[in-house]
Image (spheres, rainbow, N blue to C red):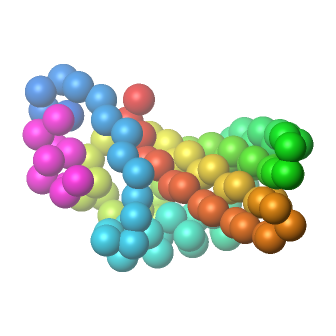
Amino acid sequence: MSKKTCKLIISSGNDYAIAVKDNQPTLHRHIKRIAALRKPVSRHIETEKTRNRFTTRTVEVFDDLTLINSQWTGIKSLIRVERVGTRTGKAYRSLLSVISVV
């Protein structure tokens, strides 16, 4: 989703939440810096074991977004979900970042 689309959504009185991928390299880099330099306002950690899978999920919410370009209209929070675990004995890690105006 582009900055222009986000502005259009806000100007029509709606909210949005978007997953940030590598196709937004500057925004993605700013999100990594926020996670490295700021403390989250909330953090939840959950561990789950099912059959041959062991997973730990960490969900963090950040509200100090001063490192993100102000052209991203209305952003109020950053949500990061990290999954770490093993699947059939093989380690894996995934990370999802979402920006939201809700």
* Vertical order, 37 against 100 (above or below): below
Q: Nearer the viewer, residue 49 or 64?
A: 49
Start-end of magenta stretch: 1-9
Q: Give residue 26's position: percent from left, percent from top.
A: 36, 75
Tell me if residue 2 is in the magenta stretch.
Answer: yes
* Name of the residue lying farthest toward the top: 13
For the point 75% across and 48% down, which residue is it?
A: 57
Give how far across and how far down residue 90 sits, in percent. Answer: 80, 70
| Horizontal side, residue 69 vs residue 85: left or right | left
**Predominant SS along the magenta part:** helix
56 left or right of 42? right
Q: Residue shown at 12%/27% (left/top)?
A: 12
Of 33 and 48, the residue lying toward us: 48
Name the residue at 56% across, 70% down. 32
Query: Looking at the image, can residue 44 be seen?
Result: yes
**Residue 34 falls in image quadrant:** bottom right
